[in-house]
Amino acid sequence: MRYDAIVIGAGMSGLAAGIRLAMFDKKVVVLEKHSIPGGLNSYYQRRNFDRGGIRQFDVGLHALTNFIKKGEKGKPFSKLLKQLRLSYDDFKLCPQTHSKISFPGMELKFSNDFELLQNEVYEKFPHQIDAFNKLVDKVRTFDELNLNQGYSSSREVLKQLISDELLVEMLLCPLLIYGSAWEDDMDFAQFVIMFKSLYFEGFSRPEGGVRTIISLLMKKLEDAGGEIRFKAAVNEILTNDQGAAVGVNVGGEVLEAPVILSSIGYPETVKLTQKMEIAPRVGAMTFLESIFVFDKKIPQSSNDSTIVFYNNAPEYAYRPAKNYFDATSAVVCFPDNYEAHKTEGEGTIRITYMANYHQWRELGRTDYDEMKDKVSASALELVQKLTPGFDGKLLFKDIFSPMTIERYTWHLNGTVYGSIDKTRDGRTPVKNLFIIGTDQGFLGIVGSMLSGISMANLHGLMGADA
């Protein structure tokens, strides 16, 4: 069967690319290996044996970055709405109260009002406020969307401006854990993207979680005339005698197209071409997450932050854990605090640690389960530390590891933020084959969708009204 374009992977970037192409009457198919869409930002369910029924959980979505108020123009989220012809109200966004960066003896709060972070820096690092403002000016004027930008170390840029190492570490902490494929650093262009996304614009969460976003995208794809196939793993990306991509093999069925957009990662995509002379490096950053459900919600008096970026050391060690998982730092998400007015019902907390893929891979089943129990115990200790006075009864817990990530996303080594070899314009050495999503260089859920849109525009619609 022949299409105008094939999209590999039904994550956020893949769905957005499929929608954008279908809106312009392109015959497009989105191929998804699994039975549900979403990729790294999806959902799953577990049977609740003690109470009966099914519990549903989000994966990936701690928060939606790039928050805007209804009617704001010129921001990434407003561009997303315009490009996909979606309604702001359909996302049912619940803005954060505030989030917190917590280091030993020092905390910085930030919210969807950038002035809060500015005031926090002024009060707690008064000797650095001029330096901080210079950084802010640099971020505002930097063209992070220039597809020809080369790599530049964020740490080096920050240290040229800010002399207090603790402030450098605290500012980097949320941005690294929310999107960096590099250990202990990130490309400054990506730093700017994340600084604007988290600090300038801030967090929200759709009512109903990630399913709200996925349902919107799925309906839009269907309405636009796009096709999606589930349980349709691509076995090979086919090339012609000139080395150009011409189609894919899906379980023995050949699908042809002059444009192939892949959201499954740069190394993973290259692997499907069987052109092993092309070798993008596999990233090292992977994580594990504990999800806890309690019989009541955590009161605001115990913790009123939506997310706590916790680090129990003066330096932030953003690198693979030395021993299975690193409890020194964590992302602690309180999803109920996005709707703090709802005080009744169960309470949920999610705790994310950095992990070591290679050590988890070597564990047998018994040792694997025992290690997950150690993770759970450590995470519950952190819950107690961050929610003083909370006495909720634990009803349910679940943990996913780097092996879970690898199994359900195709990502080699269970990486979440992909390769350190990004391709900003989406191009690969294989003609007609393009990368979208994390390895194209845009970050977060909004960034991922914008990646799919921009690469669909550039490589699939150029010459049309793109």
Image (tube, grey):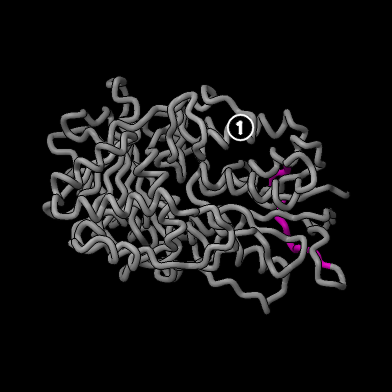
Residue 399 appears in view? no
Q: Residue at x 34, y 64 (%)?
A: 157
Q: Position of residue 313 (x, y in %)?
A: 18, 61
Left or right of 377 in this view: 397: right
Amino acid of disc 1:
Lys
Q: Is residue 375 above or below residue 395?
A: below
Q: Position of residue 259 (x, y in %)?
A: 78, 54
Which residue lies under the disc numbered 1? 82
Q: Which one is in front, 157 or 4?
A: 157
Q: Residue at x 57, y 25 (%)?
A: 87
Q: Position of residue 415 (x, y in %)?
A: 48, 61
Q: Which one is in front, 294 or 221?
A: 221
**Any magenta on residue 22?**
no
Q: Residue at x 51, y 27 (%)?
A: 91
**Mark 1 burial class by Cα count in 10 Å: few <14, some 14-19, many 20+:** few
The residue range painted magenta reads 227-239
Q: Quadrant of residue 206?
A: top left
